[in-house]
Image: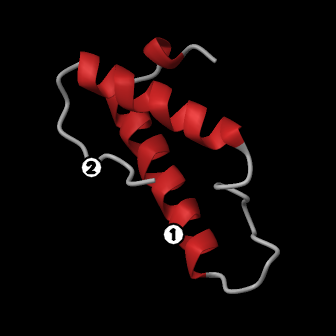
């Protein structure tokens, strides 16, 4: 995925969506999570790339606390 090709607004929305999915998974007490954010490393890799690009652009954002 071409992370640098996305607008800053889109990257911030992606970041917010990952945080929302993580929160929903963590709030879900069942063993079967809706999104599997903590189960699949792709989520964290994607999040890290987004955050790296936002930092490169010198954008303020709330980093995801894993």
Q: How crowded is mark 2: few (under 14 residues within 10 Å), some or many (20 or more)?
A: few
Query: What residue lies at 73% left-to-right and 54% top-to-bottom?
Result: 39
SS for tag 1?
helix
Query: Residue 27, relative to residue 22: is it above or below?
Result: below
**Residue 30: % across, % down:** 76, 84
Query: What residue lies at 36% left-to-right and 21% top-to-bottom?
Result: 53
**Residue 23: % across, % down:** 51, 69
Query: What residue lies at 65% left-to-right and 55% top-to-bottom?
Result: 37
**Is residue 7 shown left or right of residue 2?**
left
**Residue 62: % across, % down:** 27, 49
Query: Residue 60, relative to residue 33: is it above or below?
Result: above
Q: Hey, which residue is sitting farthest bottom in the picture?
A: 29
Of residues 33 and 8, which is closer to you in this image?
33
The answer to which of marks 1 and 2 sits earlier in the sequence is 1
Of residues 49 and 57, which is closer to you in this image?
49
Query: Residue 56, relative to residue 26: is it above or below?
Result: above
SS for tag 2?
loop
Q: Which residue carries the number 1 mark?
A: 23
Q: Do the residues labelled 1 and 2 touch (CB within 8 Å)?
A: no
Q: Which mark is residue 62?
A: 2
Say which quadrant the N terminus sits in. top right
Instruction: Answer with the quarter of the image where residue 58 lies.
Output: top left
**Residue 15: % across, % down:** 43, 44
Of residues 23 and 9, which is closer to you in this image?
23
Q: How crowded is mark 1: few (under 14 residues within 10 Å), some or many (20 or more)?
A: few
């Amino acid at each position: 995925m071409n992370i640098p090709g996305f607008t800053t607004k889109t990257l911030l929305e992606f970041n917010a969506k990952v945080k929302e999915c993580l929160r929903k998974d963590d709030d879900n007490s069942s063993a079967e999570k809706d999104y599997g954010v903590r189960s699949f490393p792709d989520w964290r890799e994607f999040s890290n790339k987004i955050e790296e690009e936002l930092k490169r652009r010198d954008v303020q954002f709330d980093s995801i606390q894993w």
